[in-house]
Image (cartoon, grey):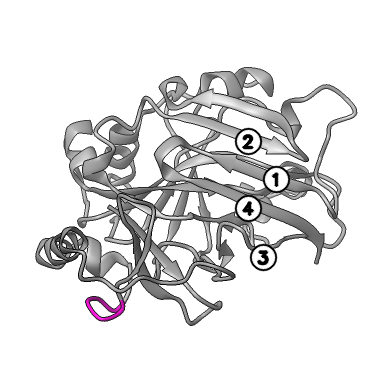
């Protein structure tokens, strides 16, 4: 299923994109698309049955904002340098263990919302990524297979990053990862049953119409199941938590000088196959 949240910021309602590409209202059936829904097999079954029956009301998509497809997110966990190609382009050795950082849930935005370039920023960068949404509480998992079994769904993410803040201002990466609007999600969440193998997905991103990233999740150093297993050794993952699994080669930081960091007025578009497409205009904060 493709699950969405639509409407004004803070007032989104749950929706579904059916197999014919028609937007359907779920607000009479569930209260939100969130961890509680993903952890409730009976509720998901009711949604599937309603989608097949055709009983769900049609929503007029014209002019309707698409919000982030997951509500009430507890935490967003990032994985750094998780593609062989990206590690090579920035001159880093592939890490022996996953590199972790946290993004605040309040950085999450809709897939087509405006992204704000922080004041004083000169190195705002793009990162098209596969996002993993947890569907069952995960702690101390024993295998990558168990990791995959705890995934509730997948989303497209732009892990926007400010590289000077991230690497040149001391401390941890979090400074360059937690600026306002720096985690656009969506347009929809695809339930895990529709993505049997998350390691065969194409990841693409364009800046002002020019293709910058053209990768595949097959290039991940640590695949999705292993990432979930690994994280569960250090923190408890709850339904609705989001893992941002790294970006392929082609970010601005990996380009030769002068590096094409984002400026106000730039337009970024990205897509991952069945997970849909995003479009953001960048403006000054």
What SS does tag 3 mark? loop
Q: Is 151 positioned to the left or the right of 244 in the image?
A: left
Q: Which residues are magenta?
A: 27-31
Q: Position of residue 112 (x, y in %)?
A: 61, 58
Foreground of the two, 257 or 4:
4
N-terminal-most mark, 1 or 4: 4
- Residue 44: x and y in percent read 17, 62
Q: Nearer the viewer, mark 3 or mark 2?
A: 2
Residue that label 4 marks: 177
- Identify which residue is drawn at 43% across, 44% down: 275
**Pointer 1 residue:** 268
Residue bearing the label numbered 2: 205
CB under 8 Å between discs 3 and 4 = no
State the SS at label 1: strand
Dividing the picture into quarters, in which one does residue 181 lie?
A: bottom right
Q: Residues within 10 Å of mark 3 (few under 14, many from 20)?
A: some
Query: If you read the primary sequence from the N terminus, does the residue marked by circle 2 or circle 4 appear first?
Result: 4
- Can the viewer see residue 4 in this picture? yes
Indicate left or right for 83 with 228 as reference: right
Q: Closer to the N terminus: mark 1 or mark 2? A: 2
Q: How many marks?
A: 4
According to the image, label 3 marks what residue? 180
- Image location of residue 59, percent across then percent down: 41, 72
Mark closer to the chain start, 3 or 2: 3
Q: Is residue 283 left or right of residue 198?
A: right
Identity of the residue drawn at 63% across and 21% down: 92
């Amino acid at each position: 299923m493709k699950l969405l949240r639509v409407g004004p910021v803070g007032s989104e309602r749950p929706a579904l994109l059916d197999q014919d590409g028609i937007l359907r209202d779920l607000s009479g059936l569930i209260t939100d698309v969130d961890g509680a829904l993903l952890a409730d097999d009976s509720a998901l079954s009711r949604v599937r049955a309603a989608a097949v029956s055709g009983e769900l009301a049609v929503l007029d998509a014209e002019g309707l904002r698409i919000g982030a497809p997951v509500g009430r997110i507890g935490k967003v966990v990032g994985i750094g340098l998780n593609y062989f190609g990206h590690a090579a382009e920035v001159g880093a050795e592939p890490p022996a263990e996953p590199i972790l950082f946290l993004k605040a849930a309040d950085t999450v935005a809709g897939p087509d919302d405006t992204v704000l370039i922080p004041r004083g920023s000169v190195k705002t960068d793009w990162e098209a990524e596969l996002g993993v949404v947890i569907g069952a509480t995960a702690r101390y998992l024993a295998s990558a297979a168990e990791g995959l079994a705890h995934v509730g769904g997948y989303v497209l993410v732009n892990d926007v990053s400010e590289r000077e803040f991230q690497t040149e201002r001391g401390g941890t990466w979090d400074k360059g990862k937690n600026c306002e609007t720096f985690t656009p999600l969506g347009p929809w969440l695809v339930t895990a049953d529709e993505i049997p193998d998350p390691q065969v997905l194409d990841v693409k991103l364009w800046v002002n119409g020019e293709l910058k990233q053209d990768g595949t999740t097959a290039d991940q150093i640590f695949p999705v199941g292993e990432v979930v297993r690994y994280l569960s050794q250090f923190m408890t993952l709850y339904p609705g938590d989001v893992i941002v699994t790294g970006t392929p080669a082609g970010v601005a930081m990996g380009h030769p000088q002068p590096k094409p960091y984002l400026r106000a007025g730039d337009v970024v578009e990205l897509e991952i196959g069945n997970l849909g497409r995003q479009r953001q205009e960048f403006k000054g904060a």
